[in-house]
Amino acid sequence: MSEIDCQYCAHRNLVGTPRCEHCGAPLRRDNRPGPTQKGVVVPTPAPPAVPLTARLPRRLARLWRPVAAAVFASTVLVGLAWVIMQSSPMEIPRPPVTTAADSLPASIRGIASCRSHNQQQGIDRCVISAHSPMLSGGLANGLDLPFYIQLSSPDQANWLVGRWRGAGSTVVSEGRTVAAISPANAVLYLDTVTGFHLETGSFASKAAARTFLARSGLVG
């Protein structure tokens, strides 16, 4: 069977088909002169222009391809970022403590004088004056109260508390912080998170040691 080309989209159609099967435009006739009237060639009327609505789908398809590619690429990147964040959760670091003295409660830090005792091990020696209200009532038998402070690795907390218990100390408070009183009535204190620990000289009695723990804010 003969075929005819569409003059708008060049699609081949069977002869006799009134409109293009591809774009819907009217098909042109063959190239023979049009019908004559009294020897005058009557021109074949030009087919009407293809409506804009017939061309829109193809134009939209061409415009949509790059947009679809960009959306797909963005979706892939977002997905990869989410997977990376889930596999590597971020941890919020705690602000560093520079020295052991920085970890002292304000009530002690304001009245104690401290100096380095063992720089290699990070141990400071501090003293509270016998005239300080912190020691009023003869808590330290009227004497200055020396104490030592140090920042240790938090993973040494169990070892340190075990050493205190092994020496016969009485634990009076235990949780994030541990407070104990030694057989010599000295106060032992440890923060298991920061690794800060404190050991004082002897108090007049265990009751005096407990009073100091409360006054200083080491035990609530």
Image: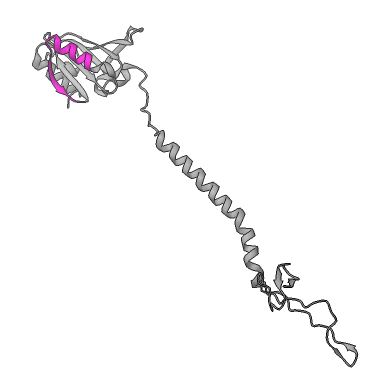
- Residue 2 located left or right of residue 168: right
- Residue 160 located left or right of residue 10: left
179 vs 119: above or below: below
Quarter holding residue 172: top left
Q: Please, which residue is most extreme toward the right here?
A: 39
Residue 110 appears anywhere in the view: no
Quarter holding residue 31: bottom right
Quadrant where the N terminus sits is bottom right
Quadrant where the C terminus sits is top left
| Extent of the magenta region | 158-175
Q: Nearer the viewer, residue 16 or 18?
A: 16
Q: Nearer the viewer, residue 211 or 133?
A: 211
Q: How is the image coloured?
A: one colour
Q: Position of residue 191 (x, y in %)?
A: 24, 21
Residue 48 appears anywhere in the view: yes
Q: Position of residue 129 (x, y in %)?
A: 22, 12
Name the residue: 89% across, 93% down: 38
39 vs 209: above or below: below
Q: Is residue 173 magenta?
A: yes
Number of numbered callouts drawn = 0
- Residue 219 located left or right of residue 51: left
Q: Nearer the viewer, residue 152 or 81?
A: 81
62 vs 187: above or below: below
Q: Is residue 166 magenta?
A: yes
Quarter holding residue 86: top left
Name the residue: 61% across, 53% down: 66
Q: Position of residue 82 (x, y in %)?
A: 44, 41
Q: Position of residue 118 (x, y in %)?
A: 32, 6
